[in-house]
Image: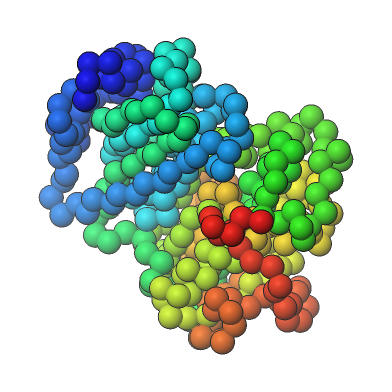
Amino acid sequence: MSRSEFDLIYNCLAASGAVFDSDEVVCGIGDDAAQLRLAKDAVLNVSMDLLVEGVHFPVDSEPAAIAYRALAVNLSDLAAMGARPIAFTLGLSLPDNDENWLRLFGEGLTDLAKRYACPLIGGDVTRGPLSIAIQVHGSTTGPGLRRSTAQIGDQILVSGSLGDGVAALSSFALPSHLDRQLRFNPERLDDADRDYLYDAFFKPEPRIGLGLNCAGLVNAAIDISDGLLGDVGHICKASQLGACIELGSLPVSSALDTLLGADDAQLAALLGGDDYELCLTAPEQNVQELQKIAEQHNTRLTRVGQIEADNGAEGGVRCVTASGEAVEMTLAAFEHFNRH
């Protein structure tokens, strides 16, 4: 790393507070590689997401908001594994050497990094279109939570509300993969709705505490990034099972309901993506205890369906109305190379 690159990362980002001491960090920024110390029998969990301007966040977004979102969506992956955050690295492509932008970006990282005791321990910066790659490292005792261990009869539970990510794009006057199918009406939103959706998009709350505390009660887990339909489908594929989702049970915010109306809000909650909530499968007898745990972590868990034997449905997931009537899905969850 050249001296100028080191200065950019250390002086601009570290000065914001995102670099701090941790018992598990043996060597952080300043050497050729970072070194982590793991407890005996600990399993290292590693995940990385790449965020590109104009694809994963609007052009000219505030640097602190971009940074918060970039770290939050990665920490959400650790939450889905039941992992405790240890540290993260940062890869940053910037069109200009803008130290003020970097300082603000660093400030956006700091709050979340300190809240979850997850310091910045290294990375790289280069010239190019604005993009952010963050790799998070977390620790579990044993395998933690997986997608592949759902059981027939498990109840499907989701944290928080769904569909707000795609609703936020509409509030920003940006396109989404559901624009051709759903009737978004952003003019219906008031200032409070817009503020809520802005925070839902740029400041999703990683469910780290929930993931850590529910591990012994849950059979399988995933974070909801591609939409509930697609992500439950990932659990079905990994576990070689099927699932039934009850559309009338999907939790939606008042802002989403205002934006779309009840029926389309259900579809946005099912297909939207970018929610970064947890989807858990658990035996029915554990649901009440899990809901109490969720309340302790300032969220709610809503039952939205059940795991079943392979049902032959596309993607392994069938959908029904509140009365149990089958719903044929003609729409699809988000895919990166099929956005519209």
In the figure, residue 244 lies in which quadrant? bottom right
Horizontal and vertical percent position of residue 156: 55, 68
Residue 37, relative to residue 313: is it above or below? above
Extreme residue toward the right, this view = 188
Residue 291, relative to residue 85: is it above or below? below
Horizontal and vertical percent position of residue 240: 43, 80
Residue 326, relative to residue 217: is it above or below? below
Q: Residue at x 16, y 34 (%)?
A: 33
Q: Residue at x 61, y 63 (%)?
A: 333
- Judged left or right of residue 169, residue 286 is left
- In this view of the protein, can residue 108 be seen by the observer? yes
- In this view of the protein, can residue 304 be seen by the observer? no
Horizontal and vertical percent position of residue 340: 66, 56
Horizontal and vertical percent position of residue 79: 41, 50
In the figure, residue 20 lies in which quadrant? top left
- Judged left or right of residue 301, residue 142 is left
What count of labels does the image hold?
0
- For the N terminus, the quadrant is top left
Q: Residue at x 43, y 43 (%)?
A: 50
